[in-house]
Image: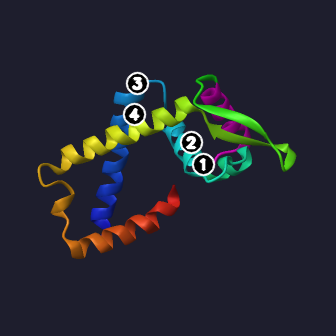
Amino acid sequence: MIDQLELIAIASVALTARALVETAGSELTFLGWRTLVLVGASNEDPRLSELADKLAMSRPSTSKLVRRLVRRELLELADDPGDRRGVRVGLTSAGRRLLQAVVDRRRELLMESLGESGPEMISPSDAGSLALAAQRLGSWT
């Protein structure tokens, strides 16, 4: 089972990389994509320091990455109202559109890869296990 999950993980990276190139061209690196995903997945715009922790990067490196994405108008910065020293990172409307476009393209690639049977090829009994694995692995996003 772990071998199959490993293949899915590798394929997910490859599908995402292809969707990125087809949708964003050279505008967005994989690390930039990961940053957009983390910011977009937050209920509240994360602090720059929280984002650095989630990316497992130093704060100066994260700040540099975020500022590049701000210049590309994909992210925006705002003062943290609860802490004058803090900075919050949010998606711009262009960032949201790009995020959705990459997800849409990746879903198209997934469907193309699965062929005519698509998701129906997964039996109902396997669907529960797949959902549980997805839920547990989702903690990484």
**Element type where label 3 sits in the image:** loop
Query: Mark 2 highlights which residue?
Result: 35
Q: Are marks 3 and 2 in contact (CB under 8 Å)?
A: no
**Element type where label 4 sits in the image:** helix
Provide residue 105's location: percent of width, then percent of height: 33, 38
Q: Residue at x 18, y 51 (%)?
A: 114
Give whichever of discs 4 and 2 has the lower sequence position: 4
Q: Residue at x 51, y 62 (%)?
A: 139
Query: Mark 1 highlights which residue?
Result: 55
Query: Mark 4 highlights which residue?
Result: 20
Query: Mark 3 highlights which residue?
Result: 25
Q: Residue at x 72, y 47 (%)?
A: 47
Callout 1 amino acid: Leu
Which span is picked out in magenta?
Answer: 55-70
Provide residue 3's location: percent of width, then percent of height: 29, 65
Q: Residue at x 64, y 28 (%)?
A: 70
Distance of mark 3 from mark 4, alpha carbons?
7 Å
Q: Residues within 10 Å of mark 2 (few under 14, many from 20)?
A: many
On screen, residue 52 above or below 24: below
Q: Residues within 10 Å of mark 1 (few under 14, many from 20)?
A: some
**Quadrant location of residue 24?**
top left
Q: Are marks 1 and 2 in contact (CB under 8 Å)?
A: yes
Callout 2 amino acid: Thr
Callout 4 amino acid: Leu
Q: Residues within 10 Å of mark 3 (few under 14, many from 20)?
A: few
